[in-house]
Amino acid sequence: MEPQRQQDLWAIAIENYQAAILTAQQGWHNVSVACSYYAVFTAMWVALGDPPGERWEHRGISKPFAQGHWRTPLHPVERDAIRAIRRLYEDRLDADYRAVRLTQLESAAGLTTAQRILSLVAHARRLSLEGIIL
């Protein structure tokens, strides 16, 4: 991936994370969960690089991310982090496609997951954590 493309995607990930915070503060928990998920998805994209095909999809991006193919040396991501990503994905599906009204509990969990994954990728790829509340 070209350095400028990586920086652009990283800015999108941070923007989604910041939007997740702002919408959670407004009580818009469904939107917050969706933004947290998109922050995580984009961070995984930054970690792995551009997709081998036309575009990344959740299953196609989450498996190689979980296996640690983006780390040197190769090192799998901790299982509890992967479970948190799966939970966030399911919550996003509830929010966007199943008409489930999410609560502060789900939006807080989504923010925690997003913060964790963004921090993990930032450390591995030497990217700025500016805009991420630690």
Image (tube, rainbow, N blue to C red):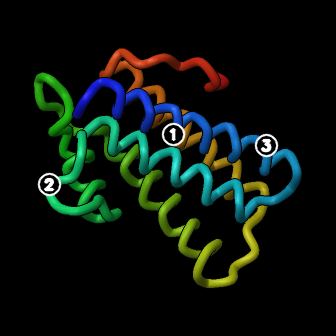
Q: Are marks 2 and 3 in contact (CB under 8 Å)?
A: no
- Amino acid type, mark 1: Ala
Mark 3 and mark 1 lie on one chain; the one further toward the N terminus is 1
Residue at 71% x, 65% y is: 30
Task: Estimate how packed mark 3 is, as few (under 14), some (14 to 19) or many (20 or more) residues with alpha carbons within 10 Å.
Answer: some
Compared to residue 46, the image places residue 120 above or below, namely: above
SS for callout 1: helix
Residue under pointer 1:
13
Compared to residue 115, the image places residue 52 above or below, namely: below
Task: Estimate how packed mark 2 is, as few (under 14), some (14 to 19) or many (20 or more) residues with alpha carbons within 10 Å.
Answer: few
Compared to residue 44, the image places residue 107 above or below, namely: below
- Amino acid type, mark 3: Leu
What is the x, y in percent for residue 82? 36, 50
Q: Are marks 2 and 1 in contact (CB under 8 Å)?
A: no
Residue at 43% x, 45% y is: 42
Q: Please name whichever residue, 30 or 83, is drawn nearer the observer in this view of the structure.
A: 30
SS for callout 3: helix
Residue under pointer 3:
22
What is the x, y in percent for residue 113? 53, 43
Query: How far apart in space, not on screen, are marks 3 and 1 (Cα)?
Result: 14 Å
Residue under pointer 2:
52
Residue 84 in the figure: left or right of residue 104:
left
Query: How far apart in space, not on screen, are marks 2 and 1 (Cα)?
Result: 20 Å
